[in-house]
Amino acid sequence: MIMRRVKRILFFILLVESIVLSLWVASSIHTSRAEYEKNVSHLKALHEIKKRDLKNQLAEELYLTTGKTVLDRIYNTRNQSILELLNRMTEESVPTDWKSSVKVDEFTKFIILIQAPGDVDDSTMNTLARSLMPMLSYCGEFVSNVAILDRKHVCRAFMDRYILTKVERSGVLSAEDTQRTKELAKSATRFNSLKIQCELINNHFYLSVNVVGDKSSANCMMMLDTGASISVIPRSLAQQTGSYNLISSPKRTFMTAKGKLTCSVIPRVILISGISNEQQVAVSDNNEISLLGMDFFIGKKFIVDSSEKAIYIWAND
């Protein structure tokens, strides 16, 4: 009887120990899992922090190589030509209302063309010198000359390497330096505009034009029409200069102040003050109509100066 009780007590103790052990194991597993998940979360947080730091570092390095301004990107010339780099640097250097372009001068040397919005005087030159100083300090080795043109695209100042070196060092031009740029400009005419003198009749500009066809050429006065997309010559001039059949030639319809107008269109060469353009012209039955349209100016820039009764024209930069 006593032995049975002892056995029962021992069995109960063993059962309790088993239950306690099971609970302890379960608790250990739960604790280990929680610890593992905590460690995983911590590692994920460290990973995100590291990723953020690397991203910030990448952004900083990208800024140094590609940057917000061209001056920041001076060291990253991959995928960029020197010409493109100089163009963008010059655009950011000069005042916002100025225009600029870069041309190949010789081999790896370039000439910068800068067009001022008005006249080029001593004050203009000093403003430009201060603006160009940072750009020249970075890539002056590639720049051989700088031509400064006025609003009519006429060179008024020319900086050679001697002047550019001074600008690069100090950003200031002396009176002697400024005079030198003016003297040099007198021979730097290859990028100048061509002045076409006009006659002002009833508030319209008229130009002396030479019309060239396959048969002959003839001079006439043509009225400048900045609203016309195509030039117009009278039928008599078309027949005088060429042998084209006006009846079978292509036709185009135009909108005029008096309504629609259908005209024959033929090829002609328009020659004005040494500038020629091979183009299509419309033929009018009205022998008093001769219009110079905007088709003559394709690929060119021009300024109409009413005060001087002239047109300044130059090739697109």
Image (tube, rainbow, N blue to C red):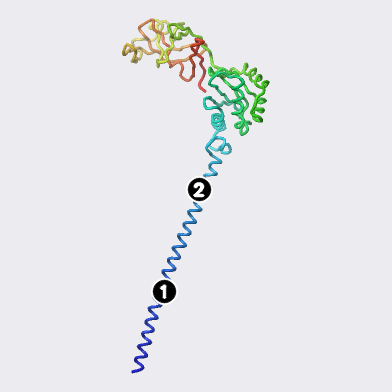
Query: Is 196 left, or right, of 281 in this rendering?
Result: right
Quarter of the image where one finds residue 167 = top right
Helix, strand, or loop for circle 2?
helix
Report x, y in % for residue 243: 40, 8
> Few, some or many C-alpha atoms within 10 Å of disc 2 (few <14, some 14-19, many ≥20)?
few
Q: Quadrant of the N terminus?
A: bottom left
Residue located beneath label 1 in the image: 25
Residue sitting at x 53%, y 39%: 67
Report x, y in % for residue 76: 56, 38
> Few, some or many C-alpha atoms within 10 Å of disc 1 (few <14, some 14-19, many ≥20)?
few
Q: Nearer the viewer, residue 256 or 236?
A: 256
Quarter of the image where one finds residue 227 = top left
Q: CA distance from mark 2 to mark 1?
A: 44 Å
Q: Nearer the viewer, residue 130 or 142?
A: 130
User: Counting residues from the N terminus, which is met first, the one under dot 2 or under dot 1?
Assistant: 1
Q: Which mark is residue 55?
A: 2
Query: Is residue 166 visible to us here?
Result: yes
Q: How many marks?
A: 2
Q: Is residue 278 above or below residue 217?
A: below
Query: Is 121 left, or right, of 3 in this rendering?
Result: right
Which residue reaches farthest left? 259
Residue sitting at x 63%, y 26%: 144
Residue sitting at x 33%, y 10%: 247
Question: At label 1, which amino acid type do we have?
Answer: Val
Q: Which mark is residue 298?
A: none
Residue sitting at x 41%, y 75%: 24
